[in-house]
Amino acid sequence: MPAPAQFCVITRYATASAEAADENQRRVEGVFAELAQVRPDNISYLVLRLADDSFLHVAFHNHAEDEVNPITSAKAFAHFTDGHEERRQGDFDRQRAGLVGAYVTTIS
């Protein structure tokens, strides 16, 4: 059976205020705390808070699309999405992306 193809999803959105961005960041940090405990080995995930208090999520998935997504199935992710539309300004932009290249070292 062939290995599932890796795919990447990029999501970007603005927040309604600096306070909303702070709350959003706290909830995202909760998702990372849960992932650190569960340690799924079929995803790579990073979230950036930009200078304008918008957020950029980059998720690499190495599981089939019909398999459980370790990010969205996390209990903390449900907490993150609860009330997200109130923290967000406008819609979010979610797109599939193809990896051109990467150099990764320890990020902290």
Image: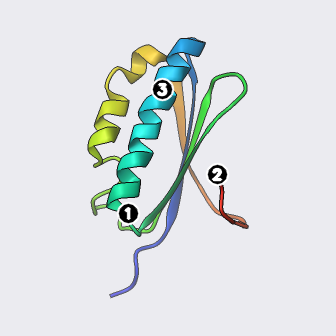
Please name the amino acid that badge 2 sits on: Ser
Dot 2 or dot 1, earlier in sequence: 1
> Real-space Cα distance between discs 3 and 2?
19 Å
Q: Nearer the viewer, residue 22 or 11?
A: 22
Report if residue 16 is visible in the image: no
Image vertical order of residue 67 relative to residue 75, above or below? below
Locate residue 18 relative to residue 71 in the image: left or right: right
Pointers 3 and 2 in contact (C-beta within 8 Å): no
Q: Residues within 10 Å of mark 2 (few under 14, many from 20)?
A: few
Q: CA distance from mark 3 to mark 1?
A: 22 Å
Q: Nearer the viewer, residue 63 or 104?
A: 104
Q: Which mark is residue 39?
A: 1
In the picture as drawn, the residue positioned furthest to the bottom comes out as 1
Residue at x 48% of width, y 26% of height: 24
Mark 3 surroundings within 10 Å by alpha-carbon count, few (fewer than 14), some (14 through 19), many (20 or more): many
Image position of 84 with respect to 3: above or below = above
Q: Secondary structure at mark 2?
A: loop
Residue kind at label 3, given as amino acid type: Asn
Mark nearest the camera among 2 and 1 is 2
Amino acid carrying mark 1 in the image: Arg
* Residue 29 percent coordinates (x, y): 46, 39
* Residue 108 badge: 2
**Which residue bears the numbered disc 3?**
24
